[in-house]
Image (tube, helix red, strand yellow):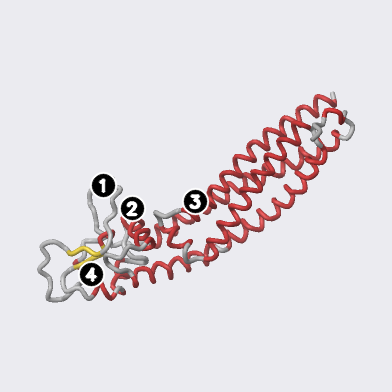
Amino acid sequence: MGSACIKVTKYFLFLFNLLFFILGAVILGFGVWILADRSSFISVLQTSSNSLKVGACVFIGVGAVTMFMGFLGCIGAIKEVRCLLGLYFAFLLLMLIVQVAAGVLFYFSTGKLKQEMGSIVMKLIQDYKDGQEDRLQEAWDYVQAQVRCCGWASFYNWTDNAELMNRTNVTYPCSCEDKREADDSFLVRKGFCEAFNSTRTESGNNPEYWPVYREGCMKKVQAWLQENVGIILGVCVGVAVIELLGMLLSICLCRHVHSEDYSKVPKY
């Protein structure tokens, strides 16, 4: 009966660690995505926000170690190597502590991240240059076109751009153009565009005449960020639960392995 329980525990531990390995890969993927993204506002933030870079590096580190520990746990469970199971338990406990600390820190840093986001975007809008090849400008153009918004709090934020407001004709940010019909095109217009058939030159470049989205991007971008932070934290909670179960199973198996025949342990 005891042998049957050990066998069941062993294979349950193997399955948990296989899932553990997969979730570790997901966490690592989140970190790589944050650092590698070049087509959304994440690229704007990660080049200017130290907290986001640190968070991404933490996720990559946690994900990589989690994958390694999942692999180690699978080997220890199948081969019933007590030293591996003990090492696995110790690393799991350490990883759980680091993961909880990082999750709490990341959650309470979202407010600071939102403030940083606002100041970064406002400076980007103010310094935006027509015809300049710049990765951050292209990323913000992509956000405005895809989310269907203009500026940060509202489209009036673009009045802080001196180059745009010095135009004598009605000129507006191309990526802000209000497209009434659904547009599935992946082509995002960049730079400044002059309104067609515009005869309103007597008042200069009046933003009231711009054919752009009136809603700012702040609420939509922050909602997107909050939603994705929730997903990331949800994955971390799932990994933590599996870690606790893995620790419990590893203890149970480790307590019985010492009475087993060690001749079956592979020799290297």
- Indicate which label's residue lies in the foreground, 3 or 2: 3
The answer to which of marks 4 and 1 sits earlier in the sequence is 1
The answer to which of marks 2 and 1 sits earlier in the sequence is 2
- Indicate which label's residue lies in the foreground, 4 or 2: 2
Badges 3 and 4: C-beta atoms under 8 Å apart? no
Picture layout, residue 210 above or below residue 203: above
Return the residue at label 1.
182
Mark 2, Cα crowd under 10 Å, few <14 / some 14-19 / many 20+, is some
Answer left or right for 206 relative to 41. left
Return the residue at label 3.
33
Rendered residue at 80%/40% (across/down):
251
- Indicate which label's residue lies in the foreground, 2 or 1: 2
Return the residue at label 2.
146
Q: Is mark 1 on a helix, strand or loop?
A: loop
Rendered residue at 33%/66% (across/down):
154
Rendered residue at 78%/45% (across/down):
87
Residue type marked 3: Trp
Residue 95 at what x, y percent from top left?
A: 70, 51
The answer to which of marks 3 and 1 sits earlier in the sequence is 3
Q: How far apart are marks 4 and 1 (CA)?
A: 24 Å
Residue closest to the far right: 259
Residue type marked 4: Pro
Q: Nearer the viewer, residue 79 or 14?
A: 79
The answer to which of marks 3 and 4 sits earlier in the sequence is 3
Q: Distance between the residues labelled 3 and 4?
A: 36 Å
